[in-house]
Amino acid sequence: MTARHWDCDLSLRYNYQPSELLDNFEIEDGTLSPVYQSSNNHSVEFTTRYGFKLGEHSTGQVYSRFFSYFNSPEDSFFLDYIGGYTGMRSYPYFALSGNTTGFSQFSYIFPVFTEIQEQVGHHTFDKLFLRLFGEVGNGWNGPDGTGANLKTGIGAELRFSFNTYYLYPLKFFISGAYGFNQFQVQLPDEFITGNSSNRVSYGREPLIHFGLTFDFEILNND
């Protein structure tokens, strides 16, 4: 029997989102009443995760996501954001957005320490992995200033695997990332910034993410 050296997950989802957003207030018969703006949005989302062996103890992974509206909602509330830990973590969450978005992330993962088997209280420490990654993507039809050119970044992540109470698997991670492209985004009026221009600069700055989860990839799964 031959062992399989790769694994692939595909997901295609259509979304219909009937929404009513608070737009204004009006006075009717001496009563202040809210006025809502209706929006019926249709979108499609495609994700793929492909893992494969790169050696005896190391693996590679390619994670990609594409999102697009069929219509073009005007309110910034409906923009799809792909920055931050669950997307392109080399840029902040609000840096990359649009009515159409897409990105790919390539990872190289290898063990640093295995079979640690050290117990502290009710925690049993097991394995330590290092993940190196590079990513590319962008958002289109969003805030002014993002530009149509693809944005790139790199990063590294320490993944610490351990068990608690002899039963529950836990994962602690800490990652650092850096985006190579610097750009200024004109945020919508709904955003509040430290200056009146509502322009914010993103990119070319180190970003740190850390957390405790049950699985290293759980934040990327729907």
Image (cartoon, rainbow, N blue to C red):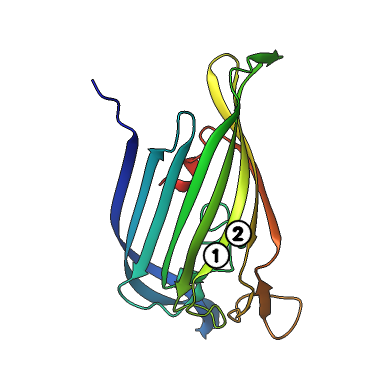
Residue 81 seen by the camera: no
Image side of residue 129 versus residue 201, left or right? left
Residue 181 sits in quarter: bottom right
Reading the image, the residue beneath label 1 is: 152
Label 2 sits on a secondary structure element that is: loop
Judged from this view, the residue extending furthest toward the left is 1
> Number of callouts in the render?
2
* Quadrant (top left/top right/bottom left/bottom right) for the N terminus: top left
Relative image position of residue 23 (x, y in whole percent):
50, 79
Using the image as rendered, state which of residue 213 and residue 147 is in the foreground.
147
Residue 88 seen by the camera: yes
Nearer the N terminus, badge 2 or badge 1?
Answer: 2
Q: Amino acid at mark 2?
A: Ser
For discs 2 and 1, the disc positioned in front in the rendered view: 1
Q: Are marks 2 and 1 in contact (CB under 8 Å)?
A: yes
Q: Amino acid at mark 1?
A: Thr
Label 1 sits on a secondary structure element that is: strand
Relative image position of residue 60 (x, y in whole percent):
45, 42
Instruction: Classify 207 as above or below 220.
Output: below
Mark 2: few/some/many CA within 10 Å (<14, 14-19, 20+): many
Reading the image, the residue beneath label 2 is: 90
